[in-house]
């Protein structure tokens, strides 16, 4: 089952994606343990796309594809920004970065998802959650 969403780059539109995750969880029997990881990881990816990728420009969109397979769920989030290099984001667990205001999103997503992939441009991320059904 593939569901596609296209939202304007407004933080308030995170609610649309939250509801989508809620609906898919109810429809497909995603476990409560998986639900929390999927919800937080997805909202973090969409928030990053809105704020960092599209710079909160309401003339730009964020695309979110949620694909439920037999046991795995893939969430792909793409913005219209110029992209970035994930390898250049400082490690937020290093002492010199502990108080930094940014840089925790990718770390958080990589801990919640079983797998995380970025496209070459750096404006699209895919989060893969394995064995999510109850």
Image: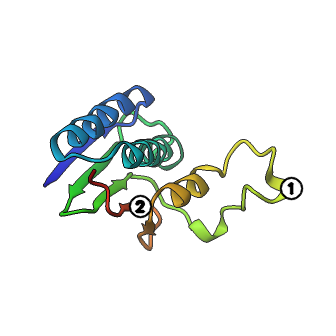
* The residue positioned farthest toward the left in the image shown: 1
Residue of label 2: 125
Q: Residues within 10 Å of mark 2 (few under 14, many from 20)?
A: many
Measure how far apart labels 2 and 1 are at the Cα level: 26 Å
SS of the residue under disc 2: strand
Q: Quadrant of the N terminus?
A: bottom left
The quarter of the picture where residue 22 lies is top left
Checking the image for residue 130, the label placed there is: none
Would you place residue 25 above or below residue 65 in this image? above
Q: Earlier in the sequence, mark 2 or mark 1?
A: 1
Horizontal and vertical percent position of residue 77:
36, 53
Query: Which residue sits furthest top?
Result: 12
- Tell me: residue 33, above or below residue 1: above
* Percent x, y of residue 93: 75, 57
Colouring scheme applied when the structure was drawn: rainbow
SS assignment at label 1: helix
Residue closest to the far right: 96
Q: Residues within 10 Å of mark 1 (few under 14, many from 20)?
A: few
Which residue is at a point 44% across and 53% down the rendered structure image? 81
Q: Position of residue 40 (x, y in %)?
A: 46, 42
Q: Is residue 44 left or right of residue 88?
A: left
User: Where residue 111 appears, x then y in whole percent?
Assistant: 55, 58
> Eyeballing the image, is 94 above or below 5?
below
Q: How many marks?
A: 2
Write the residue at 33% across / 57% down: 76
Q: Tell me the residue at 39%/51% (across/down).
A: 79
The answer to whether the residue labelled 2 contacts the one labelled 1, judged by CB atoms less than 8 Å apart, is no
Q: To which residue does mark 1 refer?
A: 96
Task: Single out the residue that lies furthest toward the front.
Answer: 134
Nearer to the camera, 72 or 84: 72
Left or right relative to 109: residue 21 = left
Q: Nearer the viewer, residue 2 or 48?
A: 2
């Amino acid at each position: 089952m593939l569901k596609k969403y296209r939202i304007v780059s407004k933080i308030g539109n995170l609610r649309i994606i939250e509801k989508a995750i809620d609906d898919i969880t109810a429809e497909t029997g995603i476990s409560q343990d998986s639900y929390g990881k999927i919800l937080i990881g997805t909202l973090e990816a969409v928030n990053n796309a809105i704020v960092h990728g599209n710079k909160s420009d309401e003339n730009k969109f964020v695309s979110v594809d949620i694909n439920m397979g037999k046991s795995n769920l893939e969430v792909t989030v793409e913005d219209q920004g110029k992209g970035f290099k994930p390898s250049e984001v400082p490690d937020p667990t290093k002492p010199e970065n502990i108080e930094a205001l940014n840089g925790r999103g990718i770390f958080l997503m990589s801990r919640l998802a079983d797998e995380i992939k970025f496209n070459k441009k750096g404006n699209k991320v895919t989060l893969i959650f394995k064995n999510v059904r109850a």
